[in-house]
């Protein structure tokens, strides 16, 4: 398998937005576990029904479910050829251990784990002002303050009416930040210990500015 990148960081840090730019530039394939789970919910599959409640409350889905989903996706030939950016996985130390096993089975090589840091008030602000395009072929992400669409409420790329994710409400967003602190932050030490961690600070700037910081951090 080609190179594997992991973007780690609290909800709202910009993993999805910066991840998409990174993938356009580098040709690696963007895999967001949050998006895969939202797709299942929309399809109304058994899996989608199982995870709906957890996601809407801002809790994590079980490690086994998410790891199985990732293993299946990583086994596909496009990823073997082009490499992958994992956005939102792993989210617990147990998931990181599972990823390690998946990669050794597939011969995958971890290129880097990028920690995208941001201050907490900015995160809350960003989550609650985030909007997304619900069109499956598009899925563009906007922010009504820092990255607004040209026409309010309408996707620049495809003209679909934008929506707010139900878990971006203030209360759920706060809960997700707490879940990050308790369950995901320990991964910083985990990957630092393995010598794989690089850091960048995501500020309250335009996307392009943060993307330059990302490239500098990854030296690309
Ligand atoms: P964000 O990073 O903005 O919180 P995501 O789109 O990555 O949002 O995830 C949305 C939700 O999907 C999470 O709050 C969680 O319920 C679920 N989820 C996504 N990835 C994982 C994962 N690796 N492990 C467990 N749950 C996950
Ligand atoms: Zn769109």
Image (cartoon, rainbow, N blue to C red):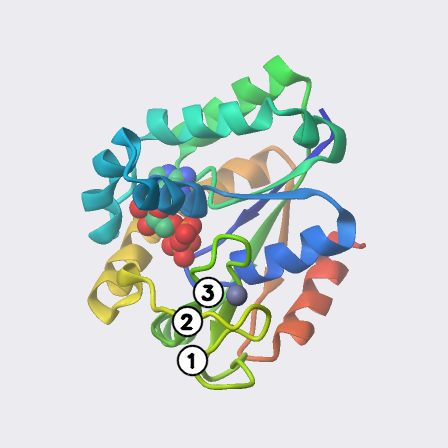
What SS does tag 3 mark? loop
Check contact, mark 1 vs mark 3: CB within 8 A: no
Check contact, mark 1 vs mark 2: CB within 8 A: yes
Q: If you read the primary sequence from the N terminus, does the residue marked by circle 1 or circle 3 appear first? A: 3
Check contact, mark 3 vs mark 2: CB within 8 A: yes
Report the side of 192 relative to 127 (left or right): right
Q: Residues within 10 Å of mark 2 (few under 14, many from 20)?
A: many
Q: Which residue is mark 3?
A: 133
Q: Which mark is residue 153?
A: 1
Q: Position of residue 83 (x, y in %)?
A: 70, 35
Q: If you read the primary sequence from the N terminus, does the residue marked by circle 1 or circle 2 appear first? A: 1
C-alpha gap between disc 1 and disc 2: 5 Å
Taking the spot 30% from the left edge, 56% from the top edge, the residue there is 176
What SS does tag 2 mark? loop
C-alpha gap between disc 1 and disc 3: 9 Å
Q: Residues within 10 Å of mark 1 (few under 14, many from 20)?
A: some
Q: Position of residue 185 (x, y in %)?
A: 41, 48
Q: If you read the primary sequence from the N terminus, does the residue marked by circle 3 or circle 2 appear first? A: 3
Location of the N terminus by quadrant is top right
Q: Which residue is mark 2?
A: 162
Does the numbered disc 3 mark a residue whose Cβ is under 8 Å from ligand 2? Answer: yes
Taking the spot 55% from the left edge, 23% from the top edge, the residue there is 100
């Amino acid at each position: 398998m080609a190179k594997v990148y992991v973007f780690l960081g609290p909800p709202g840090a910009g993993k999805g937005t910066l991840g998409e730019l990174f993938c356009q530039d580098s040709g690696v394939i963007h895999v967001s576990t949050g998006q895969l789970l939202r797709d299942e919910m929309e399809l109304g599959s058994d899996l989608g029904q199982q995870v709906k409640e957890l996601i809407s409350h801002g809790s994590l889905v079980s490690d086994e479910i998410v790891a199985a989903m990732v293993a299946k996706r990583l086994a596909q030939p496009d990823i073997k050829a082009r490499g992958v950016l994992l956005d939102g996985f792993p989210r617990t130390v147990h998931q990181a251990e599972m990823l390690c096993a998946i990669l050794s089975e597939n011969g995958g090589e971890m290129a880097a784990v990028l920690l995208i840091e941001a201050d907490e008030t900015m995160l809350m602000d960003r989550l609650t002002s985030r909007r997304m395009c619900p069109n499956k072929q598009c899925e563009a992400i906007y922010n009504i303050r820092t990255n607004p669409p040209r026409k309010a409420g309408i996707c620049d790329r495809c003209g679909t009416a934008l929506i707010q994710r139900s878990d971006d409400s203030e209360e759920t967003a706060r809960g997700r930040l707490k879940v990050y602190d308790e369950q995901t932050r320990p991964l910083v030490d985990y990957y630092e210990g393995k010598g794989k961690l690089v850091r960048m600070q995501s500020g309250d700037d335009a996307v392009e500015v943060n993307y330059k910081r990302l490239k500098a951090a990854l030296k690309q």
